[in-house]
Amino acid sequence: MTEKKEFHYRFQIRASDLWQVRMYYAYASYLAVVNITCIVASVVLIAALWQTSSGWFRGIMLAFVSLFTIVQPLVIYLNCLAQAKQNEEELDLTFHDKGLTIRILGEKEKHPWTDIVNVSVKPTLVIVYTDASHGYILTNRVLGDTRKDFLAFLKEHRSSAAQGGSSPQKEE
């Protein structure tokens, strides 16, 4: 059993947080196959044809590899920047023995452990999903030195949660 009974995090989602999530999923989905194949193919083409290619063909090859290594991540970041500007409010998450309490914009929402449908753990972040389309991003910046203990706390409480679910409770 973990020693700490509560983990409290107060933070604002940054564009870089959203970008990390989008990049993890971009390179962990079917899109990753396309991206990696195009990157490898363009690098092989550049290596094999550079010496014998004309200037315009070299430009096309460099542009092609840049699409997947520079342009795509930049476009994703700009999209995340716009999304982060729309959601500038501070998020207050408390994980405790009964579940998760979320405070945002003066409202309070409670989720028992049975509402936590998934936890995605990546090297630089943890996403706690309360349903198939809503999750809370906790980056290493937010978790700080509590990451290891927090993950153990999540594992313990999710494994001991009863099967089934209940609706979130909103309070003013």
Image (cartoon, helix red, strand yellow):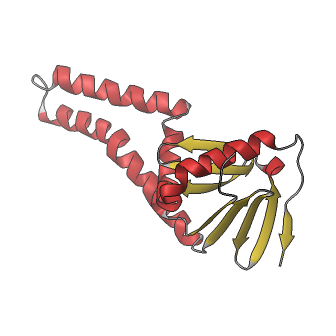
**Point 52% across, 42% down: residue:** 122
Q: Is residue 152 above or below residue 34?
A: below
Is 27 or 165 nearer to us in this picture?
165
Q: Nearer the viewer, residue 79 or 13?
A: 13
The reply, left or right, for residue 116 in relation to residue 85 is: right
Q: Where does the C terminus fall, quadrant-wise?
A: bottom right
Q: Quadrant of the N terminus?
A: top right
Q: Residue at x 58, y 50 (%)?
A: 149
Q: Nearer the viewer, residue 101 or 26?
A: 101
**In terms of image quadrants, where is residue 16?**
bottom left
* Figure check: 80 above or below 32: below
Report the number of discs: 0
Task: Give the left or right position of residue 35, taking residue 95 as reference.
Answer: left
Residue 64 coordinates in the image, percent (x, y): 31, 36
Percent across and percent down for residue 62 are: 24, 37
On the question of residue 123 being in view, the answer is yes
The answer to whether 38 is drawn above or below residue 163 in the figure is above
Q: Residue at x 65, y 53 (%)?
A: 3
Write down the quadrant of residue 117 in the picture.
top right
Q: Residue at x 66, y 49 (%)?
A: 2
